[in-house]
Image: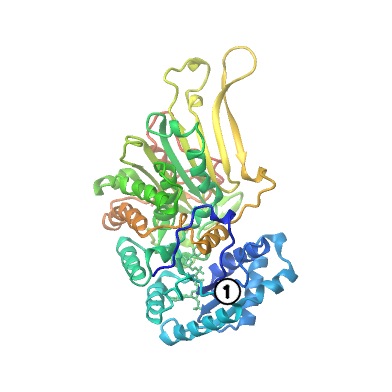
Amino acid sequence: MNSEKESTPGAQEEKMPEPCIMVIFGASGDLTKRMLVPSLYELFLDDLLPENFTVAGFSRKELNTESFRESLKEGIKDFGEAESFNEEKWEKFKKNIFYFISDYEDINSYKDLKEKLDKIDAEKNIGGNRLLYMAVPPEGLLGIIENLGKSGLNKNNSEDSWTRIILEKPFGHDLESALKLNKKVNRYFSEKQIYRIDHYLGKESVQNILVTRFANGIFEPLWNRNYIDHVEITSSESIGIENRGGYYDHTGALRDVVQNHLLQLLGYVAMEPPSLFESNSIRDESLKVFQSLRQIKKEDVNNSVLRGQYTASHIRGKSVPGYREEKDVDPDSRTETYVAMKFYVDNWRWGGVPFYIRTGKRLPTRVTEVVIHFKPTPHHLFKRRTDISQSYNMLVIRIQPDEGILIKFGMKVPGGGFQVQNVNMDFHYSDLKDHNLHSAYEKLILDCMLGDSTLFIRADAVEACWKFIQPILDEWKENHEIKIYGYPAGTWGPECADDLIAGKDFMWRYPCKNLADDGTYCEL
Ligand SMILES: NC(=O)c1ccc[n+]([C@@H]2O[C@H](COP(=O)([O-])OP(=O)(O)OC[C@H]3O[C@@H](n4cnc5c(N)ncnc54)[C@H](OP(=O)(O)O)[C@@H]3O)[C@@H](O)[C@H]2O)c1
């Protein structure tokens, strides 16, 4: 008997999660300290955690409950919301945090853990609910899942309780490893127990794409090939790879950002209206988008996908190393820190509409946005008095930072004549003063406790996204003729990325100018 009940999206507003123990595997790591526990602490301050909610850290590092709590406290102070640390509240919160030293490879560690969890459960009257959070690097995942299965920690403890597992991205390194991971986790957990987290989907502005489209009469009638010229999705970061050279050099921008975050965003932008606002209806519709992606053929990869790598530069007078000079990066690396691509969604709604995705590190600013470029009016009445480009309307959905929506449209410049000027209608979430925006991790952890899987990624969606990406990876690996372009850190990537957007009046939207002193590009 499976006690998993399907919860309605938006359940957060309606009910408090049932008591549970959240077991964090890899609890000594960065994610736990930087994201998970600061998010739990915020939920605690907002009275959104259930009574006796308990955190059990499971990790190899020589810590004890006291030192674990201390390190988490530092994490909350360093990475949590600056004004929210409160010593008195922390003292209360920390009482339900425990640490167990483990050996991931030893089945006895899991049996021991099970006994300890049962004991805490009985003492605190938790009712058997378990949330297993996999905060370990991918190489550790398969072994832990296997031992969870073998020790019985994968099972619900009773007919009325639940056990759920949260898997962190990346969901595989390529199609083959993703299939293997899904096979392993599906062997021990039912799909309803599995929550694959992509924190982009926890962002308020991403969920708002669905509300903008499906709760308003004005947008959806225009949301198709008849009125939309093209769609652009940009995710830029101003930082480089920081201290993650070892990880990044084996990953690259296509795997790190496009395969997961940006394709998930695309799913929301391009999906058909679901018939019900229910987890599987919504996820069915985004899956159909991924299944409709036109496969980029081997011979088209070079023309449709462009990769780049940042080179040393000066940003605001300060020198910045190139990617190949970064720590733990191969000096001859051909790993991309930038990708721009053009592709199509082959279905009735989007037939012929090009989609453009662009992501990169060491670009001039940190921004993620979806830009819907509408077609121009059929006749340019004011053509002689204005720039042609001014007659295009744009809807910009800003995902981060400063989440919001911007509409650009032409307006008559006051005074004589008919000069057209582009003006903005701009909404910022920060203007909603009385609304407390939860961070993506707060939202997603809470959703998982409530059994709402809407914003989590199903196995079939992961596989469909990898099927789209894999031929590009293969071609890059096999065809050494395919160039990787250098771009000076602090610029908007290789200039030749502009050639991908072919229309004579179009170019990428540049939310700010190049910051590097040298704005040229070169070929590596
Ligand atoms: N950090 C972030 O901000 C972030 C953001 C998004 C997603 N993620 C994802 O979250 C997961 C964890 O990230 P993280 O940054 O916390 O990683 P991490 O700090 O490198 O590792 C977390 C913990 O896992 C354990 N570990 C390390 N290597 C392992 C292995 N080979 N097998 C089993 N356990 C191992 C270590 O704990 P012990 O040695 O004590 O066992 C380590 O403290 C990754 O999948 C990552 O991609 C992280």
Residue at 67% across, 43% down = 431
Question: What x and y, as percent, mark residue 48?
Answer: 63, 62
Q: Judging from the image, what secondary structure is the residue with disc 1 in?
A: strand
Residue at 59% across, 79% down = 98
Q: Which amino acid does label 1 sit on?
A: Val
User: 347 or 54: nearer the eye?
Assistant: 54
Question: What x and y, as percent, mark residue 242?
Answer: 53, 62
Task: Please state if 228 lies on the left or on the right of 405 as rendered.
Answer: left
Q: Tell me the residue that label 1 is attached to.
A: 55
**Is residue 337 in sight in this rendering?**
no
User: 325 or 244: nearer the eye?
Assistant: 244
Question: What x and y, as percent, mark residue 82?
Answer: 69, 60
Count of numbered circles on the image? 1
Question: What x and y, as percent, mark residue 295?
Answer: 28, 47
Which quadrant of the figure contains the N terminus?
Answer: bottom left
Task: Please state if 422 lies on the left or on the right of 301 as rendered.
Answer: right
Q: Look at the numbered disc 1 and say if its residue's Cβ is closer than 8 Å to ligand 1.
A: no
Would you place residue 133 above or below residue 63 in this image?
A: above
Would you place residue 343 above or below residue 377 in this image?
A: below
User: 496 or 229: nearer the eye?
Assistant: 229
- Mark 1 residue crowding within 10 angstroms, few (<14) / some (14–19) / many (20+): many
Would you place residue 362 above or below residue 56 in this image?
A: above
Would you place residue 467 above or below residue 144 in this image?
A: above
